[in-house]
Structure formats: C-alpha cells, structure tokens
Image (cartoon, helix red, strand yellow):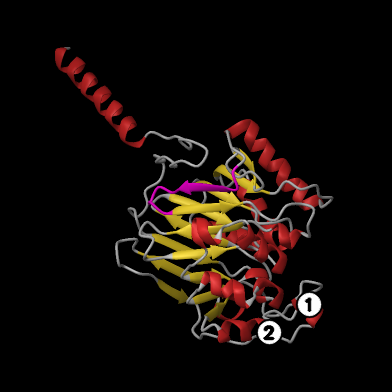
Amino acid sequence: MRRILIAIAALALLGIIAYGMFGMGGSSGAGGMIQRDASVNDPPAPAITVRDLDVGQGDATYIHNGDSRVLIDGGPDARRMGFLLDSLGLNNRTMDVVILTHQHSDHYTGLLPLFDSRRHIRIRYFFEDKDPSAASTLARLRDSVISRVQSDSLQYRSTDDPCGDGEAMCTITLRGGATMHIMRPLAAPAKPNNRSVAVKLVGADSGSFTMWIAGDAEHSAIAHFEAEGYAVNPGMKVDVLKADHHGSCNGVTPRYLELTQPTWAVASLGAVNDYGHMHQQAKAEYRNAGVQWYRTDQNGTVTIQSPGLPGSGYTITPSRPGKDLNGPSDRRASARGCAGGDS
C-alpha cells in the first residue's frame, strides 16, 4: 500500500510540473505574449516561415513562428483554402491570430473553413474593420466569429482599435519571438481597398527578416500610412513587400517603395483575371526601384524562411522557378485606374 501511495504522489507531482511548463493560456495583455499551447509540437523558436499561398485571384498569407500560427486573409475560394488548411496540418490546431485586411470576397471567403467544426481549429484573435456590409458571405463569417466569442473565448477586435486601448498600433509577440505590428487603417468612410489594415512582421532577429503586408491598400491608404507616422514607428523599411492589390498600379508609388525599400515583392493573383494584374506600370515601378518580384500565378506558393538567429538572414523560395515574370492577363492600366479609379 505504501508503494502505491508513493507512486500516486509521484505521478501527481509530475502532472503539476507538466502543467506549469505547458499550461495553456491566452494573451497576457492587449498586445502581449501569446502563451504556449500544450497541444502543439512544432519546430523551436525563433525560426519563422511565411507562405504567400497560391489561392488564385485573391490573398492569403500563412505565418508560422515557433508554435504560433497566423493567417492574414483567406483568398476567394473556401474549397481551395480548406484543402490548404488540411495540407498544412492545421486541423486540431490553434490559430493565434486571423486578420481580414478588408471586406472584399477575394480576401474573406476562404476564411469560412476555419470555422468548420470538423477541423477543430481554435482561434484566439480575429481582426477586421467591422464596417457595415450587405454581403451574405461576410455575414456568415461574422456570425461564425461571434459564435466563437460566445463559446470559445475568441477575442474579436476592430482594426480601427486593434488593441482595444485607443492606440493606432497593436503589437503582438508570437511564441517564437517574432512580432506583428497591426496598424489602424485609413478611417471610414473610404472604399474597402483603402480600409486595408497594414501589418509589419518582424522576425525574432529584426536584422534578419521583416515584411510589410497591406491588403489592397491604394494610393490614399499608402499616403495615410506615412501621415499616421508608421514610417517612424514601427518603421516601414522591410526585406519583403507583399505587393498591394495583387500587383495593381494603384497599389504602388515611388514614395511607397522609397519608404519600404524591399528587396523582393510578392504579388498574389490569378493567372487569368479581369483586372490586368500585374499592371505594366506597377512592374515598371518595381523595376525602377530595383525590386525583384515573385507572383503566385506564375511561381505558385512563395515561401520565406528565416532561422531568426542574429545575422541569419532569410531565404525566399517559389514553388516554380523564375523571377520578374509576366503573366497572361498583364496589361497597361488607364491613368484613372492607376490613380485608384478602377481596376
């Protein structure tokens, strides 16, 4: 009997130690460290992987740092995104942060599979602008988010007040040591593209990898980023720029490239699209600034990886080779289109 009691006590002590090491938790504050999740067994910090997913004419960026996971937009096709969630092994996992940059269907439709009960994907934070909309698919998505708020402690944040404290910027530290700066967009009323939220991703070693992601932000929103002071804090200079608005000329300016100074741009788009993306003028802007580009319609999913250690740098690898490529829909846009009037 004494041996049995000793064994039970030892097991209990081990359980207490395990809970202390791997206990689950949410954020330690509005923008604080996201705690370790016991159900995850991932590569150790501080490595970071960013995948600009091939979702056709739309946007979806998946970020994996330590055992934290982030999804920015979901593309236009729920079936395609569901396949990607399965292939990335995200079922029965926790998605720490989901961001809808703005309310266009080529960014939000693919977020619906995250809430499919068969996938058992838990979400901790969901960010979007919460602007009124008559779109039925967006209404379904919002109903799913609100249901999780009530049943699973999901925190539903407005990009206009990302930390819920009235500040323009919310900084979240991922469990691998990388940080995400989520910046308040141009105020409503504005066209949905110009309500796109900007996100700066900084690797655990800020000198090794940084990235700027701003949905479909056009010239007015780009000017807002500078006017709001984001060029100073958190700073807009990055290694990689997610090309605004699928490589449209209304998503890039010489000043934008001067502020961001990327080595690479990655455009997410469909090979056959009605908009002329990538626009000839946009490609000329990138060329003139010495920025190389990959594009998901020609290169497939583009994967960026950094070990996150001091001086380790990063690699950028397309699924299919070739850089600075053209596509079958590329055309020259009208002057009005490049100013944000159409396309």
Query: On the picture, is 336 further left or further right than 175?
Result: right
For marks 2 and 1, the one nearer the N-term is 2
**Amino acid type for the residue under numbered disc 1:** Gly
Image x and y of residue 179, in percent: 45, 52
Q: Which of the numbered marks, if any, corresponds to residue 233?
A: none
Residue sitting nearer the eye, 106 or 260: 260
Vertical arrangement, residue 331 with respect to residue 106, above or below = below
Residue at position x 59%, y 43% in the image:
167
Q: Position of residue 153 (x, y in %)?
A: 58, 33
Label 2 – label 1 distance at C-alpha: 11 Å
Q: Give me the disc on residue 337.
A: 1
For numbered disc 1, what is the local secondary structure? helix
Asked whether 172 falls inside the magenta stretch, the response is: yes
Residue with the mark numbered 2: 281
Q: Quadrant of the N terminus?
A: top left
| Range of magenta residues | 167-178
Amino acid at circle 2: Gln
| Identity of the residue drawn at 71% across and 57% down | 195
Mark 2 secondary-structure assignment: helix
Query: In the rendered view, would you say 312 is above or below 43?
Result: below
Location of residue 240 in the rendering, given as x and y in whole percent from the top left corner: 49, 70
